[in-house]
């Protein structure tokens, strides 16, 4: 589980095709290897889950050059990690600890699909971004609700039929990949998981339950 509060920018160090899969090596921020870094004192461990552009991946190997992750076919199809190239920046977040503050919203790291940046409007230091959505995802977004874009927890300013609008503050632009995104770029989208559970529960209600104590007429 994550919060959508990006802890640092990493860099793709290598991409190696392995059959239908992809071995992705990521070079973490330098501060993460120093005691003064803003992260917990415990170092990253083999087998740990890390959100990479909002996608929950497992560290399968690590050395001085960085961490390696295996990216399966499904993940390649649903996320922008399938088209990652050496040198690309990526948003990184370690899994939420039970004692940490929840500053964003509950994020699973299970990307629902790729959106596309359709427009970017800048006013001074602020940026308004419109993101078009894959078919079927728009119904999970509501005005002032939460959405995760490339692993960044954001508030929906406006929810349309096939797109949504978010406002990016200067800190987000400077600290995440969203400040480097351009019109036409693909971004990973994870909608609020509560909306998906509610939809699933309501879909199972084929009829109203009978009133308590009701007696059949003969």
Image: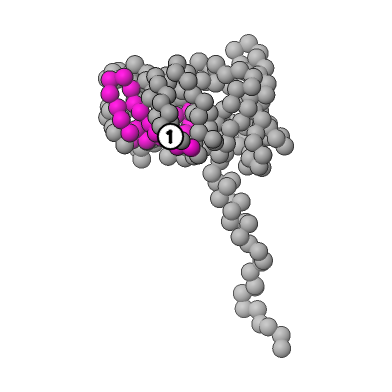
At 65% from the left and 64% from the top, the residue drawn is 206
> Is 43 left or right of 181, judged from the image as shown?
left
Question: What residue is rendered at 68% in x and 83% in y?
Answer: 216
Quadrant of the drawing holding the C terminus: bottom right
From the viewer's side, name the closer residue of 208 and 189: 189
**Residue 188, x across and y down, in percent:** 55, 31
Left or right relative to 168: residue 3: left
Q: Is residue 182 magenta?
A: no
Report crowding for label 1: few under 14, some 14 to 19, many 20 or more residues within 10 A (C-alpha): few
Q: Nearer the viewer, residue 81 or 37?
A: 81
Query: Does the magenta run of residues contain 49?
Result: yes
Q: Is residue 41 left or right of residue 197?
A: left
**Which colour style is shown?**
one colour
Q: Is residue 153 above or below residue 172?
A: below
Instruction: Specify whether 172 is left or right of 124.
Output: left
Q: Which residue is mark 1?
A: 19
Does any portion of residue 73 appear in the rendered image?
A: yes
Height in image: 198 above or below 74? below
**Total marks in image:** 1
Instruction: Please say whether residue 106 is visible from this viewpoint.
Output: no
Residue occupying the far top of the picture? 124
Q: Residue at x 42, y 24 (%)?
A: 15
x and y percentages locating residue 51 in the rendered image: 43, 32
Magenta residues, start to end? 48-73
Callout 1 secondary element: loop
Q: For the N terminus, which image quadrant?
A: top left
Expressed as whole percent of the image width and height from the top left, the position of residue 135 reads 67, 39
Q: Percent from the top left, x then y, of residue 84?
A: 49, 24
- Specify the principal SS of the magenta part: strand
Relative to 34, say whether 114 is above or below: below
Asked if 27 appears above or below 81 in the picture, the reply is: above
Picture quarter containing residue 164?
Answer: top right
């Amino acid at each position: 589980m994550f919060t959508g509060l990006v802890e640092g920018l990493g860099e793709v160090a290598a991409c190696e095709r392995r059959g239908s899969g992809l071995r992705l090596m990521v070079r973490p921020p330098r501060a993460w290897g120093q005691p003064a870094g803003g992260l917990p004192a415990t170092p990253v461990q083999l087998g740990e889950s890390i959100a990479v552009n909002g996608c929950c991946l497992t560290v399968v190997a690590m050395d001085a050059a960085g961490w390696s992750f295996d990216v399966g076919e499904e993940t390649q199809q649903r996320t922008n990690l399938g088209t990652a190239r050496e040198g690309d920046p990526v948003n990184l977040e370690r899994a939420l600890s039970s004692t940490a503050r929840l500053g964003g919203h509950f994020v699973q790291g299970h990307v629902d699909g790729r959106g596309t940046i359709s427009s970017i409007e800048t006013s001074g230091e602020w940026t308004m971004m419109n993101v078009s959505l894959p078919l079927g995802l728009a119904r999970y977004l509501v005005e002032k609700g939460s959405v995760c874009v490339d692993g960044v927890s954001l508030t929906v300013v406006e929810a349309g039929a096939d797109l949504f609008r978010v406002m990016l503050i200067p800190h987000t632009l400077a600290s995440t990949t969203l400040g480097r995104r351009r019109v036409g770029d693909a971004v990973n989208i994870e909608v609020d998981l509560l909306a998906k559970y509610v939809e699933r529960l309501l879909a199972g209600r084929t009829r109203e339950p009978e009133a308590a104590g009701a007696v059949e007429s003969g």
